[in-house]
Amino acid sequence: AHVDHGKTTLVDRLIQEGDANESGVAKEVADGERVMDSGGMEKERGITIMAKATRVDWRGHVLNIVDTPGHSDFGGEVERVLSMVEGAILVVDATEGVMSQTKFVVSRALRQGLKLVVVLNKVDRETARLNGEVESEIFDLLCNHDATDEQLDFPVVFASAKNGWACLDMSQPDRESSGMVSLLETVIEHISPPCGAELADPARHPFSFVVNNLSTDPFIGRLVTGRVHTGAVKPGDKVKVMKMKSPAGATGESDGGEAASDSPLATVSHVFAIRNGTEREAVPAAQAGDIVVLAGVPTEMVGVSDTVASPEVSDPLPTVPLTPPTICMSFGANDGPLAGRSGGTFLNSNQVKSRLHKEVENNVTIVLKPSPTDSDQLEVHARGELQLGILLEEMRREGFELTVSPPRILSVKCPETGSMLEPVEEVTIDVGQEHSGGVIEKLQNLRVSMSEYKDMGDRVRLVFDVPSRLLMGVRADLRNSTRGSAVVNAMFKEYAAPEGQGRNYLSEKGKLVSMEQGPATAYALNLVEARGTLFIDPGTEVYEGMVIGEHSRPGDLEVNPCKGKKLTNVRASGTDENIKLAPPRRMTLEDYITYMSPDEVLEITPDMVRLRKRHLNASDRAKAQKEMKQASQQRK
């Protein structure tokens, strides 16, 4: 489902329904805690970042449920778990209806041949559209993606996951006291079991298992999570790991084929089922159709999308190809003047590289490549600025000090014409009627086309096709200009040839750049404030080349934020004015990522996030700009 449509809350309610005797989990869900969002960043931001599986036992049935992220930047988590399931619950907000990420997950589920159960969530709201309009949107969406007749015959369940109930008919008098029984019965009726008894027979089909997730236990060691496709496995079994001969980079894209080489045999030490959310429970064995966690496979032998199987298996299992990354940034150690003075623990480039290599072991949507300009840096290819921002925030909290370059859009070469194609995103904006004119005007400044205008009462839905290179920073600007009321979502649509001379209107303003090093003073900032918008408070440690604000005009301006007032022997207590500064602009890490200019870098430490010029000295910046202009003229 789309972000914030209630997937994780719904899964928590299903766990609670099938876990009536486990008061601990039931109480946690009743208190409003999201059991499936177990990560610190997930709980803090209220979003799902990593896909997680759990098991629910209900009336003699075993249901393996996978909770997936809703944000488009983490769409790879959806793609990599599709091979683990036989069907999908499509959760749609009864007010918002079909959104951009809804289209993405539906297209991937239909491509995999999954059957759908549609859940209209948040039907208890006064703004819910229960007149059949949302169901028609879903039907049209399935038709546009060439769904089969069987997939078009989907059941619809009305639910309020927050209040813990679901029903098949809104006129049902006892719907609010029925729990999630209707949804569970619908899933069991319409979604087939994962496999028959034949595939679970180890005598006829040897054990095979695709790795979908990696984790580590401090006592047991490396753990691999996935679905048993054939056969059975128990502690003590010998297994081997098979990798693809020619995987498509680190994106997990593969079509099946021969194993690269015979890996050494490993012994399965533990088999776990996942219950009560994310808790592991040891089981004596697992058979085809079960989603389990295995321990005993060495770290250096296995990665996501690899096949773990019995020694007699010769071919690895195919995996679902992933959508390629669309954005990249260079990561390196912090080389700024204040490096090592902000509480960082990991300061050198080798430690940064080691952490990034550890990240891609489990995160298949991130690709690492050596930097073409600096051997001490790595290029990180990802889906969007939120995914990169989450990674940087995690590294910052772990004690890393690093410097990152501005994001760069990844173009691809057309195999037929040889021309370069750029990624285009479908941007959906839900905004109040009073702000719709301003939003349309801002998007028109990008010289992009509007593909849909939909009146939704007191709100309007606008859909634009925008090249990714023009979208940097626009989301934050739209939220600010609409006083936080705009809901902006973007999803990768296609690669297309660059059209027109569209330019990001946010790049027209310059920056206020410090020319001195030391603590900023209120006296100096009061003088600088008239030239633009400040990013810092008095007392902040600054240095030459550090960006301290945004200039109100095009072009950068050198300022001195450390200047102090000259003291004399003459008393002037009655003539001095009290200095009152406007509050500085506060930007998140994701805002800084999209705000950077090509000649800037972002310095990230545990205590501070600083924006600075790549060349700190003003004369060095002028020289670099002159060389860049000459190189551009030579290319022309």
Image (spheres, rainbow, N blue to C red):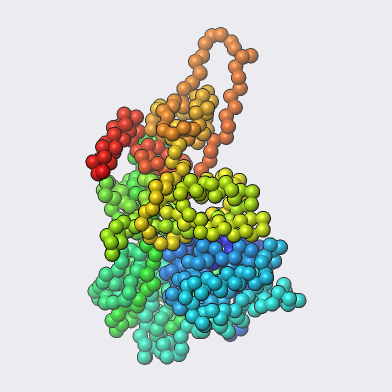
Compare residues 418 and 355 and report the one nearer the observer: 418
Instruction: Determine if residue 222 is in view.
Output: no
Q: Is residue 537 above or below residue 455?
A: above
Q: Position of residue 543 (x, y in %)?
A: 40, 31
Q: Quadrant of the C terminus?
A: top left
Q: Residue at x 52, y 11 (%)?
A: 568
Question: Does 633 sit left or right of 12 as displayed?
Answer: left
Compare residues 350 and 221 and report the one nearer the observer: 350
Compare residues 296 and 248 and report the one nearer the observer: 248
Q: Is residue 289 above or below residue 406?
A: below
Q: Position of residue 259 (x, y in %)?
A: 27, 75
Which image quarter: residue 422? bottom left
Instruction: Determine if residue 353 is in view.
Output: yes
Taking the view exactly as shown, the residue that stands out farthest to the top is 570
Q: Quadrant of the N terminus?
A: bottom right
Q: Residue at x 35, y 33 (%)?
A: 616
**How many numbered tags mark residues here?**
0
Q: Is residue 386 above or below residue 244?
A: above
Q: Residue at x 50, y 84 (%)?
A: 193
Q: Is residue 369 above or below residue 20?
A: above
Q: Residue at x 57, y 61 (%)?
A: 4
Q: Position of residue 134 (x, y in %)?
A: 61, 69
Compare residues 183 and 197 and report the one nearer the observer: 183
Which image quarter: residue 416? bottom left
Question: Does 148 sit left or right of 412 as displayed?
Answer: right
Q: Position of residue 7 (x, y in %)?
A: 57, 67
